[in-house]
Image: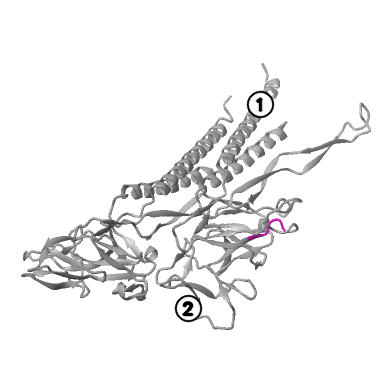
Amino acid sequence: MIRGLYIANSGMHANERMQEIISNNIANANTVGYKSDTGIVRSFPEELILRINDWQGGVGAQNKVLGEMSTGTFLEETLPRFMPGVLQKSSNKNAYAILDNLPPVNEPNRRSYFPVLNGNQTMYTRDGDFKTQVGTNFLVTSSGDPVLPIDGRTGLPINDARIRVQANGDYQYVTAAGAAYPPGQANPQLGTVDIIDSTKLEKYGDTYFTSAAAPVRGTGQLERGQLEQSNVDLPGAMVSMINVMRSYEANQRMIKALDGTLEKAVSVGRLG
Amino acid sequence: MRALWTSAHGMAGQQLRLDTISNNMANLNTVGFKQQDVDFKDMLYAQIQQTEVTGALQGRQTTSGLRIGHGVLPVGISQQFTQGTLLQTKNLLDVGIEGEEGFFEVGIYNAAGNLTGYAYTRDGSFAVGYDRNQVPYLTDSDGNPVLGTDRLPISFEGFDVSSLQVDKTGRMTALRGGVREAVGQLELVQIEHPDTNLEPFGDNLYALKDAAAPTALTRGAYNLPNGATLKQGYMEQSNVDMIGQMTNMIMTQRAYSMNARALQTVDQMMGMANNLRNG
């Protein structure tokens, strides 16, 4: 019986986490390049229930094992959904949207991203709402981090190169210090890189992802003057929210019921 | 509960966007106005550590740890310096700029009559003002003197303003004693990437950011290839896209009420938790 209390508690806790994820999705319904998260709930591992004393003699006496049961639930993971968002026209001349190629059958989560440099770390983003940095005219994301050009020969991002937007709008590829990029070293260009298994990306914030795995040559196509909107499904979020709240309520009722039963047990032993 | 703040951030963000949209709509008929929009990013994620067992159960797709977001963060308000429609007014003192990166230079004077700084504007609905010596000179619609290529106010002393002519490079001529003479030349500067190098400070004026590169501003824009030119008798209308703003408003309003709904749900959930031990 006490076990039931903790099981219902774990249910409330998982639903609370679920609601946090849904709230975050709803808050980012208008964030360019945002990918909605799905909470995955899993039951606790099954436990084997054994008889302690009365397994010798009586009905079903041969069975020491009663069976298996799980003692609750927890929110196991937040899985970003990588389906593309709606493309919307932008009056920003340096706005880009990525059009993914159909991924190969054995790599269903292969998607393309822009490489950006946040601090010293290369991160990946789908938000192509780029600006020019004041002073240097480097192409940066809307939170001010430089967009990395990719090496035309290897298809990988070049960390020490920057994209400079010239007065006429053309791109020039320079070093981080602003000097001309040495010719013949690489063939820098604005482009995308691919992450083979996008589910292994970790969200960082600022619509950036970090990846433990190295990227490979990008296959996505750039669409200039368009922006990929958030892929949050608002009606779906509404339904999950109702679902979460009712499930939370059911768990709460469960605790109340158990509490009532416990009270009965307490009053049995009470001296009149 | 984290979700309460997540939704509150969401509401605050959408509110800011609604404010921006309202400002755009209010300036639908403001000469030389450029529309703005809010850029959003998601906030940092809390990484909740998981044990070696729960972080690597079979069938799991993501890497170990639970990443839960905290809502949305408006990272900036971007300006869109697209060309507004040039409307013919036939007013001699209206000068429109053709070319997205051209700006007039305006001197900002304090009450004592000293120059305190320079500002830039696309608003070419000029007027004639008088200084304390009753000398007429060219001003913007707010009374600030518009500067010539010598970075000084353009004086109309002795000229007949009703005969003013402005060519596409800003050279102004007018009749003085029945003879057409040069008044001065309007300065037209070209500011590259005006969306990031300029900041608005009201009255249709923009200031060049301190951090802007020295090469960001070029004098005599009409000398540049594809540089901006002037058109007398025209006024540049606001570039606010009414239909786009309406669509954004609907989207923002819906997102706002969804956030409010989420907030309400969280509140209800907290109420249930509070009622756990209630007989």
- Helix, strand or loop for disc 2: loop
Which chain is home to disc 1? Answer: A
Indicate yes or no whether the magenta region holds residue B133: no
Tell us which disc is closer to us: 2 or 1: 2
Q: Which residue is mark 1?
A: A257
Amino acid, disc 2? Ala
Residues packed near mark 1 inside 10 Å, few (<14), some (14 to 19) or many (20 plus): few
Indicate yes or no whether the magenta region holds residue A110: yes
Image location of residue A51, percent across then percent down: 85, 34
Q: Does the image show residue A73?
A: yes
Image location of residue A192, percent across then percent down: 59, 65
Residues packed near mark 2 inside 10 Å, few (<14), some (14 to 19) or many (20 plus): few
Closer to the camera, B120 or B16? B120
Is A83 left or right of A2, judged from the image as shown?
Answer: left
User: What's drawn in magenta, residue-wise?
Assistant: A107-111
Q: Farthest residue toward the top?
A: A272
Q: Which residue is mark 2?
A: A177
- Helix, strand or loop for disc 1: helix
